[in-house]
Image: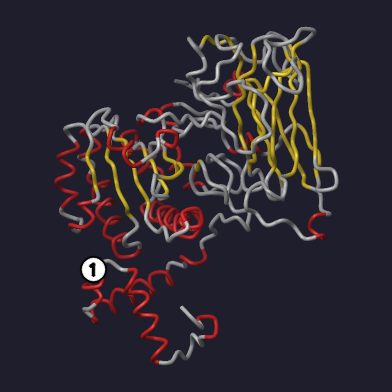
Amino acid sequence: MAGRSSVDLDNPTPEQKADAIASLREQLSDELNAYCNDVSLSAAMANEWYEWRKSAKIDDIKIAESDNTYPTPYPIRGYNFVADANIVAGPQIKEIQLKMAKYFGGGCWHKRDKEGHPIYIERVGLVNLKQLFRTCTSAEIFEFHFEMQEFLNRSVFKECTQLAGRDIHRQVVIFDMDGLSIGMVSHIQAINMLREMLSKDQLRYPEYMHRTFVVNAPAIFLTLWKLVKSWLDPRAISKIHILGKNNYKELLEHIPAEDLPAFLGGTCRCSHMPGGCVPCIAKSNIIDLPRKAFLSLRHQTQISYSEPRHTYSFDFSPYAASEDGSSSAIGSPTTTGGGYASWFGMMSNRSASPRRSTSSTEKTPFDTKFCVVYLRFTADRGRGVVVEVLWRAFGAAVDSGFSDNNNDVLVYPETLLDPQRAPVLLELKVPNRAGNLVFNWRVANFDEGQAPFPDAKEARVPIQLEYSIDAEEDLLKEFNLPPVLRD
């Protein structure tokens, strides 16, 4: 709109008002335009929306964006304004986030569809309603839900719009109903909350849905669907697609296979992240460490823009002491039965590409036995830290094909992560042979991520880096946790 920057927003002229309204009308659907023709109804809706945002202090919610260090409210994969992340129990993470991650099945913002819309996946069939309502109040759940919606609106949509080159303000939702029980469908408290949440969203976050896919829907779901349909307007109902067990063909019509998780019919595994594409405590596909696991990490060092790198290494043996001497064994050999179909830590050719996830089809000379080692680390500031992990054999070259050094196996490729937002926890699949483990950290380069580069004064302040390295079995034993189950 010509002259937009010179408009006095406090005292616009009639012509400027008419121009603004016409521009807005062009962006609205015919149905919504017709709705807006009812002036009294539109005014009441707008006033209620504004008063709600003001009384609930919605605009004061701290939302993760590229220019701040707030943590993401939920796991995320495949974006640039923040690094890929899980919900890890650092001091920055709210209790409600930990409870939702633990009891609400398992969810994630996971890449984009073919048209550029963000994809949100939730494993609804695994929700632990009993524990959710026992440990969380309705007010806490609604507060968390609104934070998720604000994160979507202020951050996720913003990046999707930039990448698509057009306005993106709707998302694709996938609800995986695998595991849904009759007890969940008949849970009165949950049904009442769902109805209230849908009602609020249609008023406060209208037109956020591009498509919703309900997959692996059992017959019992149809009973719930009949009830839910009565709460939705016809336009919303037309966007919801109910798919049966293992019926993913329609998903692949709208989502590239490489951007759709393998458990939903795609090829993506997000092998660089614990839990893969969708971390799920209910399925035990990720370790659930408590807050105290991140309060006092073993090693402290500094990196800076003048001294951007830090390397730590130690001699590793599957049946010898761990790096701090605390265990008689650093992990136990585990047979994978083909190994490279699993989601994480596969060794591959060394690459300097940031945020590169290892392909699930890259075969490795160590695809039958391995040990799992965890790296925990935090940073007190910065715009992200790039980490890489190598394993180096003692006295013998590893199978050919690895660049830089034939004795090096890439355990974890160079990946930009955000330890300044919340602690980072990585699973590392290490060859079940004696060797040397090498951990490399460095500050992010100018062309990595979207966080603004610090000014000269800020760049002189060093980044405090803290980290610990432990065998999986040591952590499970120390915090009395169940085994991690990997596909």
- Residue 113: percent from the left, percent from the top? 39, 44
- Identify the residue at image location x=37%, y=76%: 23
Q: Is residue 290 left or right of residue 199?
A: right
- Residue 204: percent from the left, percent from the top? 34, 64
Residue 84 at least partly seen: yes
Q: In this view, does 124 lie to the left or right of 369?
A: left
Q: Which amino acid does label 1 sit on?
A: Asp
Residue under circle 1? 30
Up the image or down, 62 lies above or below 303; here it is below
- Residue 302: percent from the left, percent from the top? 81, 42
Residue 482 at least partly seen: no
Colour scheme employed for the rendering of this structure: secondary structure
Q: Is residue 132 left or right of residue 99?
A: left
Quadrant in the rendering for residue 408 = top right
User: Secondary structure beneath disc 1?
Assistant: helix
Q: Quadrant of the C terminus?
A: top left
Q: Nearer the viewer, residue 122 or 136?
A: 122
Up the image or down, 208 lies above or below 130; here it is below
Circle 1 crowding by C-alpha within 10 Å: few under 14, some 14–19, many from 20: few
- Identify the residue at image location x=28%, y=33%: 249
- Number of marks in picture: 1
